[in-house]
Image (cartoon, grey):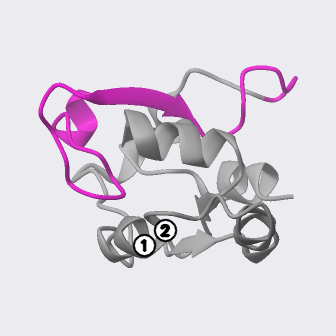
Amino acid sequence: MRAYNYRCAFSGIQLKLVDAAHIVPVSFETSTDETCNGIVLSAIHHKAYDKGLITFNEHYRIVFRKNEVHKLKELNLHGGLDKFICDLRPIIDLPPAVSDRPNVHYVATANQ
């Protein structure tokens, strides 16, 4: 959390509403608690990340999973989606220390 200055890497929100999230989930054998396998996210962005609605790639660009957005639209559960998208940064905020930044191997593993 300190590495990200207690701010959501996707939106910059602080407000004591952020969580530490694993990039490679704890349930994976290769998961680790290293800072480089973590990212700080607000509660809503953490949930969206865990549910596969949004992620980020090896270049740290935030990416929407089009199939998940399509499912929400089919179910007519996409209210607020435009605002949600608008409030995101194009690229995640990165910790100043390179060693704390998301490891691209972990990012690639999580996005498989």
Relative placement, left or right, of 56 versus 53 is: left
Q: Looking at the rendered structure, which numbered label has been put on residue 81?
A: 2
- Give the answer, above or below, for where 34 lies relative to 71: above
Q: Amino acid at mark 2?
A: Leu
Callout 1–callout 2 Cβ contact below 8 Å: yes
Relative placement, left or right, of 90 versus 59 is: left
The x, y position of residue 38, in whole percent, is: 50, 36
User: Quadrant of the image for the N terminus?
Assistant: top left
Q: Looking at the rendered structure, which numbered label has been put on residue 85?
A: 1
Relative placement, left or right, of 42 versus 6 is: right
Magenta-span inclusion, residue 110:
no
User: Quadrant of the image for the C terminus?
Assistant: bottom right
Tell us which disc is closer to us: 1 or 2.
2
Q: Secondary structure at mark 1?
A: helix
Residue at image position (25%, 41%) is: 4
Residue at image position (29%, 68%) is: 87
Give the extent of the magenta segment.
1-30
Q: Residue furthest left?
A: 15
The x, y position of residue 69, in whole percent, is: 70, 69
Tell me if mark 2 has few (under 14), some (14-19) or many (20+) residues whose alpha carbon lies within 10 angstroms of its own: few
Q: Secondary structure at mark 2?
A: helix
The x, y position of residue 49, in whole percent, is: 59, 47
